Image (cartoon, rainbow, N blue to C red):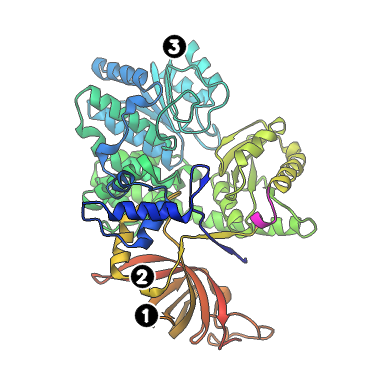
Amino acid sequence: MNKNWKLKTIYTQDRSVQNEDIAAFIEEVRNLKSNVQLPELILKLLYMRGISDYHKMLKYFKPTFIKLYDPLMMKDCDIACDRISEVIQNKERIMILGDYDVDGTCGVSMFYLFMKKFGLEQEYYIPDRITEGYGISFQSIDYAKENNIKLIVAIDCGITAYDKVEYAKTLGIDFIICDHHQPPEKIPEALAVMDPLRTDDNYPFKYVCGTGVAFKLVQAVSNKLDRPDIPAALIDLVAVATASDIVPLRDENRIIVKEGFEAMNSKPRLSLKILIESSKLQIGNLTTSNIVFTVAPRINAVGRLGDAKRAVELLTCEDNEKIKEFAFVLNDENQNRREIDKTITDDAFRMFEEINSFKNRSSIVIYNEDWHPGVIGIVAARLVEKYNLPTIVLTKVNGVAKGSARSINTFNIYEALKDCQDQLIQFGGHFHAAGLEIEIDMIDEFRESFNDLAKERITKEQLIPEIEVDAEVTFEELTPKLIQILSFFEPYGPENMTPVFKTKNVEVVDKVYFTEKSNTHIFKVKDNDSSKKFEAVFFNSHEYRDMEQNGNSINGKANKLIIKEGNNFDICYSIDKNFWKGREYTKLRIRDIKPTRLVNQI
């Protein structure tokens, strides 16, 4: 798929920033009496991340625990804090309820371990994805009643559960809701509803995950009970949830992930250590991508294919042998999930190709009653990645169609579902992701309505995938000092993505290696302006392989662009640090290439 390379626009709020504004920031930093010596390229990259003065720069480079906001600034946190303090003082039993994904299970685990520090044993409850669906269910409230529970703490869900909270009241059960999803116009009348997205909430940062919201409550109670040691002891679980839930990694989230990853890399809790090592990762060099693409899928897998309580059992366990058993189960379920995922993804690709063969669609809405509901969110993401269209994947659950929606950067899928809500049973979510239920006989009508909205709101240009480029550079500018400073931009994630650079007219030098299993090219490139070389890796690049070298037929491929020694390209890439046999070295991770001079073609 062709991609547009777009140089990032530098802006603050609604006002475009002129070059003189950047120059003023650079001058301010250079005039500081403190010995700040940063390359101009680094200062420009900071400015593009909203770092427009020295104090913001300090917070960015030193995201420490003490810079977290006062939890009592969040609406209803004081009420929830007082109630949990009473629970601890009176040794009451409560139930902790969470969603079945990483955010929900980490949040339940974190809060369970928090209460355990005060000697309290509690119930925890994770709804069954298939029989109960997302969030608070009537079954969960009945379970609480049967176990004489008077208070439920809901984490990563509950903001739309108005009727469930009313039902709980009739049974004498209170709710504290710790959620981060978009609130409806009428929020539940619970004892406390903590959600920074509430219109009446003035909390300074709006984008903590569900576990992050519950962590603010933990902070408040710990402060009230003079136990400042507790939040730091739980920050690792909050960091895993924050990284995995793909929330903006800036401001408070950046502090949480930075502190949490430092804890995991230096002295990880036993459960995470065993899970991480069983995932073939190395403690000490963990990154957000390690958690998002390797650890999180294992935690998610048990909820996708069965009982998500198994994830909580692992994360809260302190017995070495039992943790190993749980880790084996998570790895095994993840492997099963991958196999199911691949089969359904292939089916979904074929189904959409058939639909799209006679209609030029602006969206994807597909349904198969036999698909496993636990993986349709992953399949939707795969379809977005391949076709760059907003996507909804539906399957049959309890007589209705349940679906997962994923979107492209320029299309608010939550608002689109809201505009189609008359055709839906229910829905909820964010700008980029959502869930929904619909009667099966309404799917065809909904597909057309949703596609009409997408066609109206998405331009042809927006359907072409974009790569945002931070800066155009020569290899000469990529000095060891600059690369070292870039490491302090971590942790990376949404709104603090890995910097992407563009370099023009580099030449492929030396032998090119292609790995069949991972569809990956490994090669070296030389900047013709400086003769400086870097090793490069280009994943999923099979379309550029040298078919002749690999002994395959080359009929009809005379003009095919290939990666081969002597060819020149403009390259778009990020910079990776790699560790091999105790040595650290720099590698370019290629995002895209465009030819400038092709000496060797097939």
Identify which residue, 248 or 357, lies in the foreground: 248
User: Which residue is painted at 47% across and 42% down in the image?
Assistant: 303
Report the residue marked by disc 2: 478
For the question of whether residue 331 can be seen, the reply is no
Q: Is residue 238 left or right of residue 374?
A: left
**Is the Cβ of the residue at disc 2 closer than 8 Å to that at disc 1?**
yes
**Mark 1 belongs to which amino acid?**
Lys
Q: Position of residue 421 (x, y in %)?
A: 68, 32
Q: Which mark is residue 185?
A: none
Q: Residues within 10 Å of mark 1 (few under 14, many from 20)?
A: some
Report the residue marked by disc 1: 532
Report the residue marked by disc 3: 172
Span of residues in magenta: 458-463
**Is the Cβ of the residue at disc 3 closer than 8 Å to that at disc 2?**
no
Residue with the most extreme right position: 358
**Is the Cβ of the residue at disc 3 closer than 8 Å to that at disc 1?**
no
Q: Position of residue 351 (x, y in %)?
A: 70, 56
The C terminus lies in quadrant: bottom right
- SS at circle 2: loop
